[in-house]
Image (cartoon, rainbow, N blue to C red):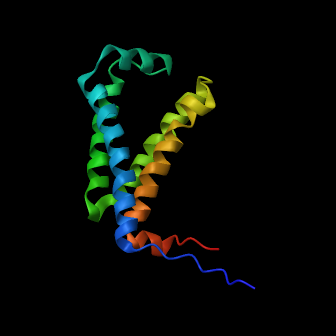
Amino acid sequence: MTAIAAPRAQSPKTLIRGGRILSGLFVLFMAFDIGIKVVDIPIVDQTMAQLGFEAGGGRAIGWLELACVALYLWPRTAVLGAVLLTGVFGGAMAAHIRVQDPWVSHTLFGAYLGLFMWGGLWLRDAGLRAVFPLRR
């Protein structure tokens, strides 16, 4: 008989490094998204109109996202920022459902962002891992 070795637990440094990578990718995308909304390029107004919002609404959403991402980046308020951003992503998903956009490419994009955001935070934060542990 051969013994099966138990899987090695990940070291905190490895988890933190992985969390920083996921969070970094999330923040890079959000920086791009916030930038195009705050600068108010024409495609943002066109997209907002297709979703049923008035022109210029993208700029306000961009500033709101910026505030939430800033909270997410500061360790003491990271969970609050993630909760608020989850609400923003839910609203975006609802808007895409309302206009019957494709699910995989448009509607679920907020869920994909949420997975990167929460996954990165979960890997970085031992307290969050304690509240939501993985179980076998």
Residue 79 visible = no
At which x and y percent is residue 124? 37, 64
Q: Quadrant of residue 54?
A: top left
Residue 57 left/right relative to 39:
right
Q: Quadrant of residue 58?
A: top left
Q: What residue is shown at x 61% (from left), y 26% (from top)?
A: 102
Q: Image height check: is 92 above or below 123?
A: above
Q: Residue furthest front?
A: 1
Residue 38 left/right relative to 47:
left
Q: Quadrant of the C terminus?
A: bottom right
At which x and y percent is residue 121? 39, 60
Q: Image height check: is 86 above or below 46?
A: below
> So how many labels did they put on this image?
0
At which x and y percent is residue 48? 43, 21
Q: What residue is shown at x 50% (from left), y 22% (from top)?
A: 51
Q: Quadrant of the N terminus?
A: bottom right
Residue 39 visible = yes
Q: Residue furthest right?
A: 1
At which x and y percent is residue 85? 40, 47
Q: Image height check: is 73 above or below 3?
A: above
Q: Image height check: is 79 above or below 99?
A: below
Q: What residue is shown at x 61% (from left), y 73% (from top)?
A: 135
